[in-house]
């Protein structure tokens, strides 16, 4: 039984980790907590739903309940959500950054979150949606562990994206520039780094990963206007637990929060899962404010 909860926690943690990466990137480079980030997951899920609805009817791929339309929807969701993040930055965050008042950005992100959530309800309605009505059959992978093919796909795709992100940050010129801006934006600008270009790529990478995380959540649970609001606290908890500003800490924090929430179900019930993320976030801020892999400023 415990093994099954651990497996479920890894599936949830993979989704949270992808969302937490965008949060920690935004905070590390732009120095503010973006509460609208959860809506990027929601919009990504709905962009993919729009694409799969337009190109539905194909056969499912192997053991999965989805076909090529969902894979195409992943690409569309990534691009469209990255464009949405860039648009939000251009219209709202960039003008406010000039004022250098951090709290204004945080409050604006609250407002943007409410606005984006209501846009989704207006366009798609409040009812939950699904990428496919086919029931995913769980199979025993290990003794006491049953997962369906969609859940295995989610974990493998998340792992592949995290490896790709590591290679991007460690071995590309743009990745090194992003790390330089994170360390010291003023010094990076003096050395000739185009900070504005780096900021644009932060939104593209963060928004794109959030979109894929939203599609993953929609594939394994459901697509609903409230999904981003539901996931934003666990994602913040993951980013803080791992160490705000640390990409690898966000991944570790996402897995820990996912496992903790899953293991809490038999103890306190599923209705209190969000409280687990809040308690862990509170404890790490109280006992180790820099997080597990965070840097002291």
Image (cartoon, rainbow, N blue to C red):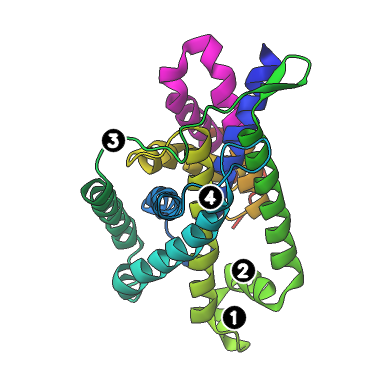
The CA distance from mark 3 to mark 2 is 44 Å
The CA distance from mark 3 to mark 4 is 20 Å
- Residue at image position (48%, 12%) is 268
Residue at mark 2: 183
Q: Earlier along the polypeptide chain: callout 4 or callout 1?
A: 4
Seen from the viewer's position, the closer of residues 53 and 120 is 53
**Quadrant in which residue 166 is drawn:** bottom right
**Quadrant in which residue 297 is drawn:** bottom right
Please give the label number shown on residue 70.
4
Please give the label number shown on residue 187.
1
Relative placement, left or right, of 230 versus 70 is left
Q: Earlier along the polypeptide chain: callout 3 or callout 2?
A: 3
Counting from the top left corner in percent of width and height, residue 25 is at: 54, 59
Q: Earlier along the polypeptide chain: callout 2 or callout 4?
A: 4
**The N terminus, quarter of image:** top right
Relative placement, left or right, of 172 versus 191 is right
Number of the front mark, 3 or 1: 3
The CA distance from mark 2 to mark 4 is 38 Å
Number of the front mark, 3 or 4: 4
- Residue at image position (52%, 80%) is 197
Name the dominant secondary structure of the magenta segment: helix
195 within the magenta span: no
Counting from the top left corner in percent of width and height, residue 264 is at: 54, 18
Relative placement, left or right, of 13 versus 144 is left
Number of the front mark, 2 or 4: 4
The CA distance from mark 4 to mark 1 is 43 Å
**50 versus 266 height, above or below:** below
Q: Residues within 10 Å of mark 2 (few under 14, many from 20)?
A: some
Q: Are discs 1 and 2 less than 8 Å apart at CB? A: yes
Q: Are discs 4 and 1 less than 8 Å apart at CB? A: no
Residue at mark 3: 127
């Amino acid at each position: 039984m415990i093994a099954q909860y651990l497996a479920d926690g890894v599936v949830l943690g993979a989704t949270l980790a992808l969302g937490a990466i965008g949060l920690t990137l935004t905070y590390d480079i732009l120095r503010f907590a973006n509460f609208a980030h959860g809506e990027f997951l929601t919009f990504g899920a709905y962009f993919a739903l729009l694409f799969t609805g337009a190109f539905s009817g194909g056969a499912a791929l192997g053991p999965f309940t989805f076909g090529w339309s969902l894979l195409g929807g992943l690409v569309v969701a990534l691009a469209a959500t990255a464009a949405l993040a860039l648009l939000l930055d251009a219209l709202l965050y960039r003008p406010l950054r000039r004022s250098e008042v951090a709290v204004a950005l945080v409050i604006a992100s609250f407002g943007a979150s409410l606005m984006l959530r209501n846009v989704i309800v207006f366009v798609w309605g409040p009812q939950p949606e699904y990428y496919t009505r086919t029931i995913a059959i769980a199979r025993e992978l290990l003794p006491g562990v049953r997962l369906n093919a969609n859940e295995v796909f989610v974990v493998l795709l998340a792992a592949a994206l995290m490896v790709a992100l590591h290679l991007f940050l460690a071995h590309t010129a743009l990745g090194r520039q992003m790390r330089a801006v994170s360390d010291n934006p003023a010094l990076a600008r003096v050395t000739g780094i185009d900070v504005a270009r780096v900021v644009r790529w932060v939104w593209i990478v963060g928004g794109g990963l959030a979109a894929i995380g939203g599609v993953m959540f929609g594939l394994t649970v459901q697509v609903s206007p409230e999904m981003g609001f539901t996931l934003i606290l666990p994602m913040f908890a993951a980013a803080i637990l791992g160490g705000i500003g640390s990409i690898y800490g966000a991944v570790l924090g996402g897995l820990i929060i996912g496992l903790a929430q899953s293991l809490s179900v038999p103890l306190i019930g599923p209705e209190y899962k969000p409280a687990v993320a809040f308690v862990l976030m509170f404890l790490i801020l109280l006992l180790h404010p820099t997080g597990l892999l965070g840097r002291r400023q």
